[in-house]
Image (tube, rainbow, N blue to C red):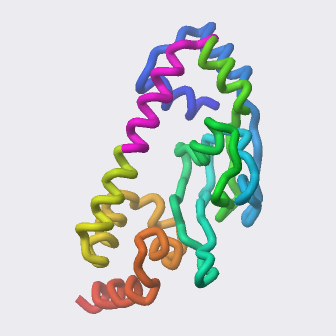
Amino acid sequence: METLIQSISQHVKLSPEEISIFKSFWTERVLEKGEFLLRNGDICRHDSYIVSGVLKAFCINSENGNEEILFLAIDQWWATDILSFSQQKVSIYNIQALEKTRLLQISHHSFQKMLQEIPAMERYFRIILESYLGTMEKRIVLNHMYKAEQKYYHFLETYPGIASRVPQYLIASYLGISPEFISRIRKKNKSS
């Protein structure tokens, strides 16, 4: 809980009373490697903050059956289907643990109640969503403008914590390039 409170305090100030109220809304959950946080067709009932671990969000490509990675998330990141959670509608993707993952979760009902009781949290989540939206916009632009090798190097530079903990084939899927291409880049770098 302390890492989440520290993250919040970087953006908004909460009083000791607000922190106490805030803590009352959250529950802990542990996912074992391979366990699903969310499955396609379910409603995302909780917003989840990763205390420790790694999650992948993906869809299954109906044409070839491959996983298409939407996002990868590690310690001190959020992992939620925002649209499903906010509208309480069916999710179109899956979120699965790549290693044992400890989460803090808040239900949709508790989330709404928390925002009413602690107005500063509305600002915090607006800041987090703005950052997420900016990241998504940048990803779209980079996917259209960068060549495969540039996308890979940009990913390594931007997300070294993910690159060291996630298999290369998942990074390749996230970047929209083949795992073989990443292998060639890495082989070329070793021989340089």
Instruction: Using the rendered view, name the quadrant where residue 118 is placed.
Output: top right
Name the residue located 59 percent from the left edge and 9 percent from the top edge.
Answer: 16
Q: Quadrant of the C terminus?
A: bottom left
Question: Which is more toward the observer, 102 or 67?
Answer: 67
Residue 99: x percent and y percent? 67, 62
Seen in the image, is 176 located left or right of residue 167? left
Q: Is residue 72 above or below residue 124?
A: below
Name the residue located 72 percent from the left edge and 24 percent from the top edge.
Answer: 110
Question: Which is more toward the observer, 42 or 24?
Answer: 42
Residue 149: x percent and y percent? 28, 78
Residue 64: x percent and y percent? 59, 84
* Secondary structure predominantly adopted by residues drawn in magenta: helix
Question: Which is more toward the observer, 162 or 81?
Answer: 81
Q: Is residue 189 above or below residue 115?
A: below
Task: Report if residue 118 lies within the magenta region.
Answer: yes
Q: Is residue 49 above or below residue 143?
A: above
Residue range corresponding to the magenta coloring:
117-133
Instruction: Using the rendered view, name the quadrant where residue 83 is placed.
Output: top right
Q: Quadrant of the N terminus?
A: top right
Seen in the image, is 43 located left or right of residue 8? right
Residue 98: x percent and y percent? 65, 64
Name the residue located 76 percent from the left edge and 43 percent from the top edge.
Answer: 29
Circle count: 0
